[in-house]
Image: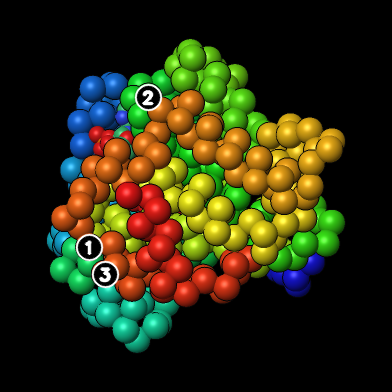
Amino acid sequence: MNNFIFSYPTKVYFGKGCVKEYLASLLRGYGPTVMLAYGGGSLKKSGVYDQMISILAEAGKTVVEFGGIMPNPTYAKVQEGAKLVKEHHVDFILAVGGGSVIDCSKIVSAQAMTDSDIWELENVKREYPTKFIPMGAVVTASGTGSEMNGGAVITNEAQKVKTGRDYPAANARFALMDPTYTYSVPKFQLASGGFDILSHIMETYFSPCDAENVSDDISEALMRGVIRDLRASLANPEDYDARSNLMWESTMAENRIIKLGKKGDFQCHQMEHQLGAYTDCNHGAGLAVLHPAYYRHIYKDGLAKFKRFAVRVWGIDPTGKSDEEVAAAGVEALADFIKEIGLPTTLRELGVDESIDLGIIAASCNVAPGSYGKMCHAEIAAIFSECR
Ligand code: NZQ
Ligand code: ZN
C-alpha cells in the first residue's frame, strides 16, 4: 500500500427521518443567516423545499435563497452565489440536492471568502483556497459522494474547461442522508448516478497498488452492491433497502476510504469532464458511453486486475478460458449492464452529434498518470471516435 494519513471532518446522519430529527439543532450551532442552495424544480415538486423552509424557521434563521443551480454548475453560477453570500453576510450554506448543488456550494463558500478570482487562483496560480464559509448538505440524489468529500467540479463555459479539486477544508460539516428523499429521482438520473458510483469505484480499483489490499477488497463488495441495488431500485423506486444501500455506496465510493493506499486512475472522468465542458452532457451517462471503450484499450495492461474484476464482480467462470478471455468478458459484462440499465452506449445516443469535433475535446483532456495503459492524446481521440 502507499503511505497515507486519514481523518474525517464530516459528521453523517443517515436514515429515514434524519433531516427532520437533526437539522434544526445542527443549524443552531451557526450564525443567524443561512443560504439555502438548491437546483431546479425538483425540490419544490417533492415537498423537500417546504420542509427546509419550515426547519429553518424553527431554527430561527434568516434565509437567503440561492436556487437554480444547474447540473454541471458553471463558474458564472458560482459568482452569483458568492455575491449573495457577501451581500447578505451569510453565516452558513445549506446545500440541498445532488452533486451539482453540493459542489457549487463548496466553491461559493471559497469564493465568498476571498477577493481573488477563484478560477484564477486554482487553475492559473495553482493555489488552494484556505478559508470557507461552513456548509452542510442534505442529499437528494445518490451518485457523486460530494456530501462526504471536499471535491467540487465546476465548468468554465467561456474556457470550455470542466475541472474539480478536492479541498479537505471544504468538506461539509454535516451530511444528512434520508434515502426516501431519493425516491423521486427520475429513472434516467437514478441509472446515471448509479453508474457514476460504479465508475468512481472502478477508477480507484483499476490502479496501483496491486498487491492484496483492503481498499480493493472493499471496492469489490461495493461494486457488487451497486449492481444489485441499482437493479432493485430501478425495478422498485421505493425499495428502501436498495435506496439506502445505494446512498451509502455512493458516499463510500468517494469519501476517500477506498482511495487509501491506491493511486487512482480517473482517466475516464478526465475525458467525461471535457466532453461535458463542450456538450453539457449528463455526467454518469457520459461515463457510461466512455468506460467500455476505454477499458477495451487498457485491459491487457492490467490483465490480472481485470480478470479478478470479471470473476469477483461479474461472476464470470474462468474455466477453460485464457486470462485475456476472462478479462475481456468482464469488460463486456460491464457494457451489457450499461445497456440493461438504459444508459446510452454511443455518443450519438448521448446527444453528441457529428458536428462536435472530438479531436478538439480529446486534445483538451488531461492524461491521468494512474492508468494501467500509457495514455496519450492520440489514444484518447481514438477512444472518443470508437464511441461515435
Ligand atoms: O436541479 P433539480 O431540479 O434539483 O434536479 C436534479 C437534476 O436535474 C435532479 N434531482 C436531484 N435530486 C432529485 C432530483 N430529481 C428528482 N428528485 C430528487 N430527489 O437530478 C438531476 C441531476 O442532479 P445533479 O446534482 O446534477 O446530479 P449528480 O449528483 O450526478 O451531480 C453531477 C455533478 O457532480 C459532479 C459532476 O461532474 C456533475 O457536475 N461530480 C462531482 C464529484 C465530487 N464532488 O466528488 C465527483 C463526480 O465524479 C462528479 O464529477
Ligand atoms: Zn463521477
Q: Earlier in the sequence, mark 1 or mark 2?
A: 2
Q: Quadrant of residue 305?
A: bottom right
* 68 is higher (above) or lower (below) than 361: above
Picture residue at 43% right of the left edge, 50% below the top: 290
x then y, percent, for residue 169: 49, 65
Labels 3 & 1 near each other (Cβ < 8 A):
yes
Up-down: is 179 above or below 359?
above
Residue in view at x 44 percent, y 43 percent: 288
Q: Residue at x 34, y 67 (%)?
A: 362
Give 314 or 134, whichever is nearer the viewer.
314
Is 1 displayed left or right of 70 in the figure?
Answer: right
Q: Determine whether the beta carbon of the residue marked 1 sits less than 8 angstroms from the nearest atom of ligand 1.
A: no
**How many numbered discs, if any?**
3
| Residue identified by numbered label 2 | 187
Element under label 1?
Answer: loop
Marking on residue 360: 3
In the drawing, what numbered circle is on residue 181?
none
